[in-house]
Amino acid sequence: MQHHQPGAEKNTRPSKTTRFIYGVTLAGIIVLLTAVIGRTGLEWYLHDKLDLDPPQPRVETLPPGALAANIPPFNGPHPSLSSRPSETFVFPIDWGKAGPANALFAGANQYPFMCQTLDSDLGNPLPDNNSGYGTPVLEQGQITGYSKDCGLPTRLHYLGYEQNQFFRDDNTLTHTKADLLVRAETGTINRFIYVLLMPTTAQDTRDAPDVSHWNGKAVYYFKGAIGIGFQQGKVSLSRLLKDMRPALEAGFAVLYSTGNETDNHYNITLQEDTALRVKRQFAARYREPDITIGFGASGGGLQQYLLAQNHPGTEKKIGIIQGGVAIQAYPDMLTQTTYGLDCELLEYYFDHLAADKPNWEDAAARQRIEGLAVSETLQPKLGWLTSLTSLLRLQWPVSLQGATECNYSWRGSSQLVNNPTFNSHYPRYSDALNQLSIWSHWQDNRDAYGTDARGLANLPVSNVGVQYGLRAWKNGAITAAQFLDLNARIGSWKLPADMRPEHYWLISGDDSLRDFSAYGEHNMSHEGKPLWPAPRFAGKPEAARGAWQSGNIFNGKINMPIIDVRPYFDPKLDIHHSWAALSSRARILAANQGHNDWQSIWISDAGFDARWPAFFAMDQWLSEPSLSAASGIPDYARDRCFDAQGNLIAAGDGVWQSALLSQSVFKTGPENTTDGACTQVFPFHQGTRQLAGDDIRGDRIFCQRISVNDAIRSGLYAPLNVAPYKTQLEQVFPDGVCDYHLPDQSWPAATTQ
């Protein structure tokens, strides 16, 4: 069996001289274009060459009361312990009418809100005011009103393939010889665009649906990516049909909403509210499905973990979904941001602040601190632009052999998630709205994290006390001097209220190419200066507690089947690393006294995608006459791994056994340090916090701290003798160091009851 080793690929990297010539040439081209046609002209040029959609009307103004100040962090019962209010809207939605604009239990609507009905080729949004709130609605170039809630009339379409060519008929079917014919309903629920797909025949009519090709089951399609809210989301009916074709051809109906696509937002309460209502619309139009299977990748996968936790129940009238196929899933959004936000702090340190920069010019050296996968042949994302701007500043570009997952896949995430002044969709909002500085994941979840007196969301994370590279120091992979220098200089991100606009050139609306920075160091506590020690800032523990209480963090409590399926993309430095599956498994084991009755992990070589085999295995699992924890995971769905041709390598208990599980602080598995058969083929990596002492669960966002003196006495640094460095350690960590033997300080016990 082949053991995947990062960096084992043949080195085909161009020489430094070649890269220098490329950089200078590219610099000349871009500077010339900018000088001739200006930044706006260059934006339009790139827009055209990338075949992007034409610009749409901008969101102009806010309705009154949109920015709420002094919202307390959520402190109510965990959603798994609370009931939901009775439905107030009468489903089904009438044809030609819009669905409900206000959520049932997910709180007040978020504004500004960008309409994307035109982007979706579904026409203008319905005007709902004449006061200038929201997006102008244009008819023949004239403003006929404004839409703040982006409603759409409920419509019928027919989609399909004829001679394997996609077609779309609106209202009336004209393609009568289709290879696959699907009835498609579109409209808006909770302001998001929903789509219901039903396999049908040419005998179908709007008011007399032909469901003879439906098997009585449904798929709820969750989609992924990273979004921060304030937008409706774009749907492509042709892409939706392509993605779900195997399910439709097997007779499944499909439910989808842009509100359940994390490219648009990451508010799990609103996602649940929306999914629940979309399913009610489906049931009112047709009937309740016999079973509903969740299906989706990345953020579409983590929604399934959180919905299984927050809205439990395997019975069709209780759970939104009865089983899930979580593809390339994380456990949740918040706990992945801890190491995600560490990435640029570390990359900037390695490239610019380290006392011994040559030591960090090899990606493999950085892996000792970051933990994530590395490659000797790939190059950092936007590395060419970083080198170009260095040349424009008359500086020699950074030297790095290879790339890390941090600088290849996570680059740009910290700006999008963390900086309230950064909005990659800035051209779609008026200048006045862009200056509100509310654009962040934290703001998208203000009801969980709370807001300050300005209406700015609280920060729920911290790196105070984190000893980056602790394991490497204890193992002798770095020296005491390197450990101290790293932790003294790394600093942290500024608090949201103190952040300034990003220097991401065209993406952030910055006119200056010379000022471009992939790191965002001006928003770090050291502002790019070699301070010793650089301060570290903490968010609010009560905001983190609100994250736990509101169900935004996966605590391992589920009572429905989930198959966590993913290709092994670690050597490609894909952001969807395999150890996320192990993190979810560790939380499930910890929350269930070492038992796992519901989750199965399927990982394949990158050449084979097992999502559809997993889907049909889930269908079989949910069709078992006795579906319970006591019955266990059936053999055909158990843990397994596949080669590039889809052949089974190994399956069954123990194939994903790993020292990362058995050696975790909370002893979540049996004391067995021998890697399982699948783990040996597809080894797991780790994140920054695991290499700083956390376990593979990775659910501590506010670690409990102890003094350096207590850490030495407790053996935290064993086998090192750190007595000679005690004074320096106390200078670097004046607020103490993380003790990962203790639970997260923001972890309310009620979340696991």
Image (cartoon, rainbow, N blue to C red):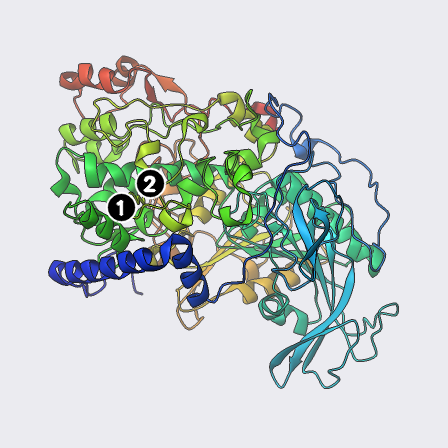
Task: Please say whether residue 5 is visible from this viewpoint.
Answer: no
Q: Is residue 612 left or right of residue 539?
A: right
Q: CA distance from mark 1 to mark 2?
A: 23 Å
Q: Residues within 10 Å of mark 2 (few under 14, many from 20)?
A: many
Q: Look at discs 1 and 2 and give the one toward the viewer.
A: 1
* Label 1 sits on residue: 514
Q: Earlier in the sequence, mark 1 or mark 2?
A: 2
**Image quadrant where residue 643 sits:** bottom left
Mark 1 lies on a secondary structure that is loop
Q: Position of residue 283 (x, y in %)?
A: 81, 56
Q: Is residue 164 left or right of residue 498?
A: right
Give the quadrant of the N terminus: bottom left
In this rendered view, identify the residue nearer to me: 722 or 241.
241
Q: Residue at x 43, y 52 (%)?
A: 576
Position above or below: 115 against 552: below
Give the quadrant of the C terminus: top right
Q: Position of residue 88 (x, y in %)?
A: 84, 40
In this rendered view, identify the residue nearer to me: 428 or 445.
428
Q: Hey, what amino acid is under mark 2?
A: Cys
* Label 2 sits on residue: 343
Position above or below: 346 against 256: above
Q: Residue at x 54, y 62 (%)?
A: 54
Q: Is residue 720 left or right of residue 78?
A: left
Total residue callouts:
2
Q: Position of residue 63 (x, y in %)?
A: 68, 35
**Image quadrant where residue 82 sits:** top right
